[in-house]
Amino acid sequence: MIKKTLYFGNPAYLSLCNAQIVIKLPAVEKSPNVADIIRQESVVTKPIEDLGVVVLDHQQITITQGLLEALLENNVAIVTCNSRSMPVGLMLPLCGNTTQNERFRHQLEASVPLRKQLWQQTIRTKINNQATVLRQSTTAETRCMQIWAADVRSGDPDNLEGRAAAFYWKRLFADKHPGFTRSREGEPPNNLLNYGYAILRAIVARALVCSGLLPTWGIHHHNRYNAYCLADDIMEPYRPYVDKLIVDIINSAEDYTSLTRELKARLLGIPTLDVQINGQRSPLMVAVATTTASLYKCFAGELRKIVYPELS
């Protein structure tokens, strides 16, 4: 079952009651002029078991310890945002699987050749998905990207990922943004990419924990300051789905120079994006769970290939 994403962009009191998240509005709670019946009707509840991601995007949100505990026990990813509404924090449960110790050992003992092969599969799928986005969104010729994808060797020692990325970003937004450069601090639509990737990262990190894996221990990324190296690895083939959504936003002529509530709502729909995986159509959040489950089987020696989605 696909889990829901809850976004809070206004002051709110968030608490727990009967396995439900209870949402109260401070403006209503504190007002002496509001009738009790209206105050009661303003309270909203949601079953915690239905949630996958909770985004906290306001400085005046109060959340109880009891609710935090319940959310983490149900493998809900909690994303916190800064004053510019950009995600800056991610809270995940420490234990997300009943056989976690065994799964950790399989992951940590994975050989270097296996990790390099898994990275090869990851980059091949990413480049092929990027090529599909270019074909669908631009008039660019993508045969070179297909050749690069086929030529990726174990561990990608030739850095074909970087070559494909340079080709891809130069052309993806060329019509509306000639000379576009992908940068976290760059001009729009970098703001949309940053926000979309942060949501995607939370989805992937949550799925890894649910599969009993360490999101810190990557197959390729290994920055000592990065707590989510494996999430950054596994999200690579999913990034083009976010890119395609942002192309659609740009083509809709909507103002995206700042992250409006409407834009955030569209980007928070990333978990429900339709993807093709294992020959079937599936919401992105469910597909990510399939990918992370297959990754564990690769570590355990039960599979030789990660199951990734393919853009078509």
Image: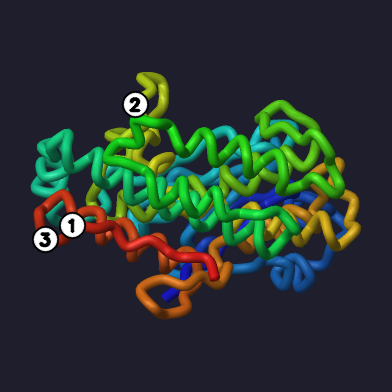
Q: Secondary structure at mark 3?
A: loop
Return the residue at label 2. Answer: 222
The answer to which quarter of the image holds residue 240 is: bottom right
Q: Is residue 240 left or right of residue 207?
A: right
Q: Specify the amino acid type for callout 2.
A: His
Which is more N-terminal, label 2 or label 3? 2
For the residue pair 127 and 6, the one nearer the viewer reads as: 127
**Residue drawn 36% across and 59% down?**
74
**Is the C-beta separation of discs 3 and 1 under 8 Å?**
no
**Residue drawn 67% across and 56% down?**
267
The answer to which quarter of the image holds residue 246 is: bottom right
Q: Residues within 10 Å of mark 2 (few under 14, many from 20)?
A: some
Q: Is residue 5 left or right of residue 212?
A: right
Q: Residues within 10 Å of mark 1 (few under 14, many from 20)?
A: some
Q: Residues within 10 Å of mark 3 (few under 14, many from 20)?
A: few
Q: Secondary structure at mark 2?
A: loop
Q: Position of residue 210 (x, y in %)?
A: 30, 56
**Residue drawn 33% across and 54% down?**
73
Q: CA distance from mark 3 to mark 2?
A: 25 Å
Q: Position of residue 147 (x, y in %)?
A: 47, 50
Q: Position of residue 155 (x, y in %)?
A: 30, 36
The disc placed on residue 302 is 3
For the residue pair 87 and 61, the one nearer the viewer reads as: 87
Return the residue at label 1. Answer: 304
Q: CA distance from mark 2 to mark 1?
A: 22 Å
